[in-house]
Amino acid sequence: MIVKGLSRQILVAMATVTVAAGLLVFFGTYLAFTILFYFSPWSEDNDSWLTGFDFVILTVLILIALIVAALASIRLARRILEPLESLAESARRIKDGDLSTRAIPGDYSLGETASLVEDFNAMAQRLQDMASDMTLWNATIAHELRTPLTILKGRLQGMIDGVFEPNEKSLHALVLQVDSLARLVEDLRTVTLADSGHLDLRLQPVRLKDEILRLAAVLDDELRQEGFHLKLDLCDAMVRVDPMRIRQALLALVTNARRYANRGLVEISLSIEKDQVVLRVSDEGPGLAPDIASSAFEPFKRGGDSGSLEKGGNGLGLSVVRAIVEAHGGKVRYARSAKGGAMFEILLGKAVS
């Protein structure tokens, strides 16, 4: 084992140093006395030279020093190796799939060793969190895919068996389920690419007001039919963004309001505040429930009946908004609107001329 090998190396090294120091003291003392007596006036007096008893004393002292040094070496090695042994054992357990294991820092006076163990434990915790998130993602994705796939299979099997007539209405319903699947897949792709830092952006100077007006022209009739009134308050701002991705984020916010807000006003505003382009989408309520407002932009988060989160959607709309905005180097946040509803604010960076 690596730690046991390291223990032997420490002990051998400390013992070698101790023996070398003892021998150096012994022979150094002998040499010093030899020179001293050679030049001293009583150098011919043999009785004044080192006696056998003197050598015995020196030998005993060296042995005592060796014993003390060995004990100190063993104690130091144990203090150093205990956290390293715990670290090695924890690493083996993590390799075998036990992500809950943690190493013991041991003596905190050994700063570097304790810091190493703490960093290892932080890494292990992050691995465990990532594994848990992946398990949750897989289960949630399977759940989200199951409903439209079950409907598609049931309808198609019914048409084959003659239970359903393949008319325009039934085929249109199947197309809607396919659209739902396609939207889920695209949302998953966007969030995954953004989290891995590989979301493809085609940045260019864009007059954002024109992009919003084009999107609003498409959405206005549908919103009116559902009892909403779209209000625009747009400044003439140029900003370097990917227009397609910004439209995607804005559409997700408007769709969120369209699904869950009270019928009434939906306002899109664009302004420049402190040289920063700010895009806001607000509605007239009821807004997000307090218990989910802090996690609104996490994937697969849905609100209850009183929340304007993605009840009935795939739970990815707001996380897609966050992914797109952060890929642009911006920020997105939620606040209550002046009328008590939800207000989503996108900060896109500095305007360009």
Image: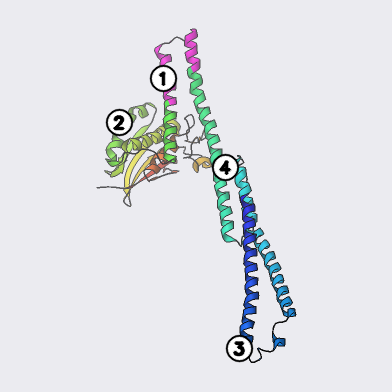
> Residue 56 is drawn in which quadrant?
bottom right
Label 1 sits on a secondary structure element that is: helix
Which residue carries the number 3 mark?
Answer: 39
At label 4, counting other C-alpha atoms closer than 10 Å, the crowd grade (few under 14, some 14-19, many 20 or more) is some
Asked if residue 254 shows in the view, the reply is yes
Left or right: 108, with 163 as reference point: right
Label 2 sits on a secondary structure element that is: helix
Q: Is residue 339 above or below residue 112?
A: above
Asked if residue 304 shows in the view, the reply is no
Residue 84 location in percent, x, y? 61, 53
Determine the CA span between mark 1 and mark 2. 24 Å
Residue 217 numbered mark, or none = 2
Q: Nearer the viewer, mark 3 or mark 1?
A: 3
Front residue (pair 297, 73): 73
Is residue 327 shown in magenta? Answer: no
Which residue carries the number 1 mark?
Answer: 175
Numbered range of the magenta stretch: 153-181
Left or right: 282, with 288 as reference point: left
Label 4 sits on a secondary structure element that is: helix
Q: Amino acid at mark 1?
A: Val
Determine the CA span between mark 3 and mark 2. 111 Å
Determine the CA span between mark 4 and mark 1. 40 Å
Direction bottom: furthest residue = 41
Residue 75 numbered mark, or none = none
At label 2, counting other C-alpha atoms closer than 10 Å, the crowd grade (few under 14, some 14-19, many 20 or more) is few
